[in-house]
Image (tube, rainbow, N blue to C red):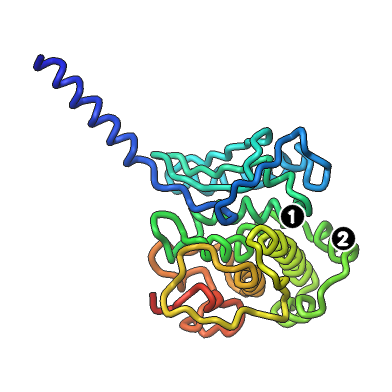
């Protein structure tokens, strides 16, 4: 009897240890939804499996050594056949994971740059710094996506120039990027990030059931009295992508897990452009 009790106690201890080693999933790139897009319904309006893997190859290749230097293992879970329309991040022991799903990749309007932004957002939960609640909060993960991650992944000046030349660029985005950056290469990168943010904001608007389409020239005027740790509305998220892309900073300085002023643009640091939008961020919290 004592042996059975000991074994039961050990099982409970192991189960508890296993449970507490996993920090909660982020709430997902998208608000919680029941939408499913299985392979059999794929109409080629999203990205292909090859594009899915090419995006994740780039993100994994860049960040695996970065996260290894912090003593952890970067795990990119590729779930192409899964019909889930979302993406997630999780810490499981020494594994810093991102979960990427084919359902989201197959969503109409998704393109490789938009999918890169999603992967960068999920990576930002691990590396985006403060404000955090176990992982970086949703707005901070958005901020990190265009503050640092996409700048590392889109480090091809010719590809960025070709992108800009082949797209009609919103005049507000074009002017803002031209004001923040002095070189054509920097401006082109800023524009490419902005377009990805804009396209994803339209998807966020659709899935969030919002009526008004997000735009660069209609920033969210609301101001929170404490930092919102959940998903802001689509316009606020576009504002975050836009401002982070405009932030002129030393990208070799990583955001800090405790001090939100390190490696970012802040009023405290004297910057007026590239700040976290007040529609989700409160500087005093």
Q: Circle 2 sits in a helix, a strand or a loop, which is it?
A: helix
Q: Position of residue 154 (x, y in %)?
A: 72, 57
Who's the residue at 78% across and 39% down the image? 42
Q: Is residue 177 left or right of residue 225?
A: right
Q: Is residue 151 left or right of residue 175?
A: left
Choose between 68 and 170: the one closer to the eye: 170
When asked about the image quadrant of residue 8, the answer is: top left
* Mark drawn on residue 221: none
Who's the residue at 41% across and 75% down the image? 226
When asked about the image quadrant of residue 82, the answer is: top right
Total count of labels: 2
Pointer 2 residue: 162
Q: CA distance from mark 1 to mark 2?
A: 14 Å
**Location of residue 208 with respect to 179 vertically, above or below:** above
Can residue 55 be seen here? The reply is: yes
Q: Is residue 101 left or right of residue 175?
A: left
Mark toward the start of the polypeptide (1 vs 2): 1
């Amino acid at each position: 009897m004592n042996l059975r009790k000991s074994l039961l106690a050990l099982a409970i201890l192991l189960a508890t240890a296993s449970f507490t080693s996993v920090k909660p999933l982020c709430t997902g790139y998208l608000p919680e939804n029941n939408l499913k897009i299985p392979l059999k319904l794929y109409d080629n309006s999203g990205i292909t499996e090859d594009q899915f893997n090419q995006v994740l190859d780039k993100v994994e290749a860049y960040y695996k050594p970065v996260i290894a230097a912090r003593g952890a293992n970067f795990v990119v879970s590729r779930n192409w056949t899964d019909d889930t329309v979302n993406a997630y991040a999780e810490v499981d022991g020494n594994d810093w994971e991102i979960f990427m799903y084919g359902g989201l990749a197959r969503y109409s309007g998704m393109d490789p740059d938009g999918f890169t932004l999603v992967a960068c957002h999920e990576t930002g939960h691990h590396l985006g710094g403060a404000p955090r609640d176990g992982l970086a909060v949703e707005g901070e993960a958005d901020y990190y996506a265009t503050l640092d991650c996409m700048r590392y992944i889109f480090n091809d000046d010719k590809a960025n120039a070709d992108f800009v030349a082949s797209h009609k660029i919103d005049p507000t985005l074009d002017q803002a990027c031209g004001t923040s950056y002095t070189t054509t290469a920097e401006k082109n990168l800023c524009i490419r990030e902005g377009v990805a943010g804009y396209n994803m904001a339209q998807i966020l608007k659709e899935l969030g059931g919002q009526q008004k389409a997000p735009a660069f020239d209609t920033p969210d005027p609301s101001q929170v009295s404490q930092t919102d740790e959940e998903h802001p509305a689509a316009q606020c998220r576009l504002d975050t992508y836009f401002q982070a892309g405009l932030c002129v900073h030393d990208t070799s300085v990583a955001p800090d897990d405790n001090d939100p002023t390190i490696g970012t643009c802040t009023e405290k640091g004297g910057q007026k452009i590239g700040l976290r939008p007040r529609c989700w961020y409160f500087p005093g919290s």
